[in-house]
Amino acid sequence: MADGRQLFYFDETDHPGRVLHDPRELPTVLPASMVRYDALLGEWVGIAGHRQTRTYHPPANACPLCPSSDANASEIPSPTYDVVVFENRFPSFAGGEGTATVGDPAAWIGQSRPGSGRCEVVCFTSEHHTVLSRLPVRRMRTVIEAWTDRTAALSAEPGVEQVFCFENRGVEIGVTLAHPHGQIYGYPFVTPKTAAALRSAADYRQRTGRDLFADILAAEIDAEVRVVAQNDTWIAFVPFAARWPVEVHLYPRRPVRDLTGLDEAERDDLAALYLEVVRRMEGVFADSLPAITGVHQAPVHARDGDYRLHLEVFTIRRSEGRIKYLAGSESAMGAFVNDIAPESAAQRLRDVVLETAGEGVL
Ligand SMILES: [Zn+2]
């Protein structure tokens, strides 16, 4: 790209006409991120003041994620693309000056590190007016290929401790670009949620000698009541203690630490099951689906068996026209109160009748 950032095309067919020259005059944005240690909660917090100037709700004809045209020189120089990944111009984390380790408690207070790592944008389609869940399984499979490729690449970058592929969807979530896209963060630390899960799994193994992830999965399969959909290699269920009105977790049946460990059949099955889950979620409310998808992967330096790959999809919608906001209990205390029983959410998801017409919809 014009300012030296990298861009990667993930093509489903041969595209000899890919434009590799970015003609724009683009001033370089100097990332000035840092991470600071919250000694009380034992968590790292990113501070990224340079992001306040990032692109905010541009009109569709000036979309930076559409393919370039004569009228709009966008982030993608080609006139078309399938899936494309590029470095975020306004990254929360960038550079390889080292990862953030906690170290000696005597140095906990006032501890900060460079905001190392890497942030990338994943465009799911060149079409501006659509959503990922309306795209064919083939496209979802290409997105998974892109996530997997970038997970391997970012895991090898200095300064990256954990790779997180995610999608924020809907203005209610705070999305500032309408074009269907997701992001990939390479964090310079193990994120708080993953750190908590690693502690729980280690504690469980020490006390019972058993694998917490395997036992949770077995319990959900056994209970059946929260299972939403499944295929040969994956299962999707509403977790026993779901926090969000409609929340679904997708687990591979085989223990795998991250996307790079999936075989071809498992990637194919994930593409199909993921789209089915999101389409079921869209059918629960006669309204838009502001949602977040997160791909939970083992930290780069975790040992095999410490953590298991899974995906989480949830919506902040709790009924038609109503949003679940994170208010006092959730925001200030981290204590969630869910308005819909997980078993009831699972039933509603199973009851959704999916369209089967249309090319490649299911
Ligand atoms: Zn666009």
Image (tube, rainbow, N blue to C red):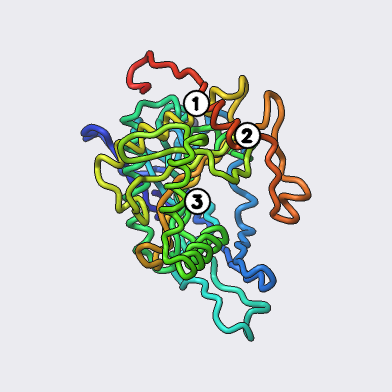
Q: Secondary structure at mark 2?
A: helix
Examine the rendered structure and indicate whether residue 56 appears above or below residue 215: above
Q: How dense is the environment of label 3, judged by Cα within 10 Å: few (below 14), some, or many (20 and up)?
A: some
Label 1 Cα neighbours within 10 Å, binned few <14 / some 14-19 / many ≥20: some
Q: Which residue is mark 2?
A: 171
Q: Quadrant of residue 141?
A: top left
- Between the C-alphas of marks 2 and 1, the distance is 27 Å
Label 3 vs 2, first from the N-terminus: 3
Please state which amino acid type lies under the numbered disc 2: Val
Q: Name the image quarter holding residue 118.
A: bottom left
In front of the other: label 2 or label 1?
1
Mark found first going from the N terminus, 3 or 1:
3
Whether pointer 2 and pointer 1 mark residues with C-beta atoms closer than 8 Å, the reply is no
User: For mark 3, what is the residue?
Assistant: 89
At x 42%, y 59%, the residue is: 211
Residue beneath disc 1? 350
User: What residue appears at the point 45 percent right and 36 percent down from the top-left corner?
Assistant: 73
Whole-percent x, y for residue 175 in the image: 59, 39
Q: Quadrant of residue 308?
A: bottom left
